[in-house]
Amino acid sequence: MAVGQDTNQLSRIKTFLKQKNYKVQTAENSKDALKSLSNNKTSIVISDENILDNRGLDFMRIIKHRYPQTVRCLICNETDSPSIRTALKNKEICTCLNKPWEEKDLLNKIQDCVERLQTCEANRESMKYILSAYQKTDCTRNEDLILSSALLNVLPQAAIVLDKDFHVIISNDIFNLKIAAELHNEDLPNELREILHNRMQKNWSDFRFHYDMNKSQYDIRVRPLRNTDSKRAIIFFDSLDRSLKPVNNSA
């Protein structure tokens, strides 16, 4: 979907992307855009920073809240402004397209968005596989496969299993190569362990947060294992600094 008050720009985006076999919906204001999103499966939202009834960044915050799995691209004059950097850090937008743009620039951004969708879908499928394997193992009372590093290596991102004292007992290869090697330690920073301890002592349930480590920012997802004899949890680390890898060609 493409949103913006510049009808010439909307027409240009729609015509060009249709030539590349993308299905494109357009809207000049956030009200029409949200109505269209509620009726059509949409993977990518491109919004100009200027729309008729809202600011582009404010509109993107609404999209993130209502449709968090969409990839959001903002068309703007200054891609390095403080507000844009903050929006990127908070994942309110995923990427930016600088004005004035050429068709090749637009296509490159769309392809980047498509790669992000593919990677996110792969992550979701891998997590389903992990949890399914765990449930099957628990039901048959065989060895707990979730604690196997081989099983964790199915994941496309860094992952670990923590024991009840919040120490790493299993880690996959990506964690060992990308995070532990830079920490020069097989365990977690004390500050991160304290965050996990405080949150999980209060409520043994799923949660996620952002954390800076090794000069990189991570989206950390915590999935407690409720069916084991002792408390353990799987921790997933998604780097916010990498480019992610379309579920379909819908924009």
Image (cartoon, rainbow, N blue to C red):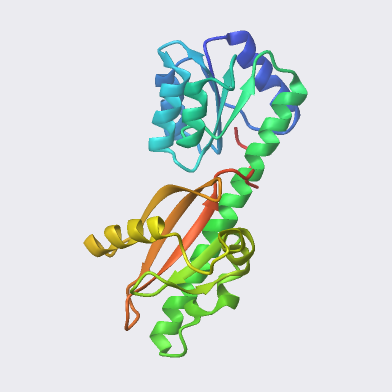
Q: Residue furthest front?
A: 184
Quarter holding residue 65: top left
Residue nearer the viewer, 94 or 23:
94
| Total numbered circles | 0
Q: Residue at x 70, y 20 (%)?
A: 15
On the image, the x and y values in percent for residue 75 come to: 59, 20
Q: Residue at x 42, y 27 (%)?
A: 34
Above or below: residue 114 compared with residue 202: above
User: Residue extending furthest left?
Assistant: 202
Image quadrant holding the N terminus, namely: top right
171 and 20: which is toward the camera: 171
Place of residue 42 in the rendered image (x, y in percent of width and height, measured from the top left): 53, 36
Q: Residue at x 49, y 65 (%)?
A: 128
Percent coordinates x, y for residue 12 in the rendering: 68, 15
Q: Position of residue 209 (x, y in %)?
A: 40, 49
Observer able to see residue 247: no
Q: In the figure, residue 77 lies in which quadrant?
A: top right
On the question of residue 48 being in view, the answer is yes
Is 210 left or right of 44, judged from the image as shown?
A: left
Tell me the quadrant of the picture where the C terminus can be found: top right
Residue at x 25%, y 64% (from the top left corner): 201
Please say if 51 is above or below 107. above
